[in-house]
Image: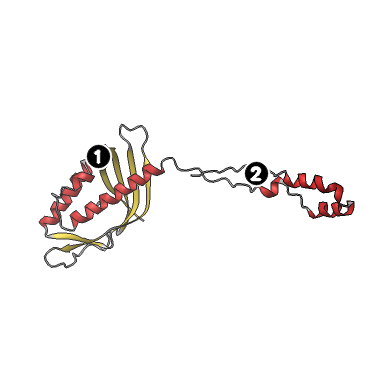
Amino acid sequence: MAIARPHHTGNRRLLAAAAATATIAALTAGCTSGSKNDKNAAASPTVSPSATTAAASPSAPADPEAADKAEVQAAYTHYWDVLTAAYAKSDPDDPNLAKVSSGDALVQNQQELATFRKGGRIIAGRPQHSSTAVTFKADTKLKTAVITDCLDISQWKPVEKSSGKSVDLPNTRLLRYVNTVTAEKWPNGWMVLEDKQEGKAC
């Protein structure tokens, strides 16, 4: 069942040496003995520029796509919120589905929801996601993102709507699998166009 479903600143400080100490030392030189001057000179440590300036370690360059990825991730999370709510009542006519998906993804979910409704079943619980990665396709008319993650449906289970009894399912089915979603950025936000179970455990 292929149900699926976004710096660094460097502050340079300029250090200036105060000349007041040198001026006072020059004015008082004639009133003090040479030995005292020697002692004062010995007691005044010489501080090298290298000791006063901390070497700044280079920081990693910021990801130029970080903001776009965060936006896609938020849209992907919302997509799953809508799906989870629709499957919790097996409602293929949920108007929110068309607000987050279109094309194959929308048709696929509506068909599966209709099948669940016909069989008197819903999906209780919630899927979990991990290892989510977002990449962007190049040279596309609309900005296109590909979201890949590990989808865990072990706590998202079909049950009989009337009794709440769990539905028996094959033991061989994958409970954690790689899922890939393709989305486009439309004027009203990101829309999921394809939602594909890869058939690979994760």
Count of residue discs:
2
Residue type indicated by callout 2: Leu
Nearer to us in this view, 170 or 35 = 35
> Can residue 1 be seen by looking at this rendering?
no
Which residue has dot 2 on it?
15
The image quadrant where one finds the C terminus is bottom left
Numbered disc 2: secondary structure:
loop
In percent of the image, x 67 and y 49: which residue is there? 52
Residue 118, image quadrant? bottom left
Dot 2 alpha-carbon crowd within 10 angstroms: few under 14, some 14 to 19, many 20 or more? few
Q: In the current view of this chain or complex, which residue is farthest to the front?
A: 31
Please state if 101 lies on the left or on the right of 49 as rendered. Answer: left
> Can residue 162 be seen by looking at this rendering?
yes
Nearer to us in this view, 58 or 140 = 58
Please state if 20 lies on the left or on the right of 27 as rendered. Answer: left
Task: Please provide percent x and percent y for residue 191.
Answer: 26, 42
Which residue has dot 1 on it?
188
Nearer to us in this view, 35 or 175 = 35
Please state if 60 lies on the left or on the right of 164 as rendered. Answer: right
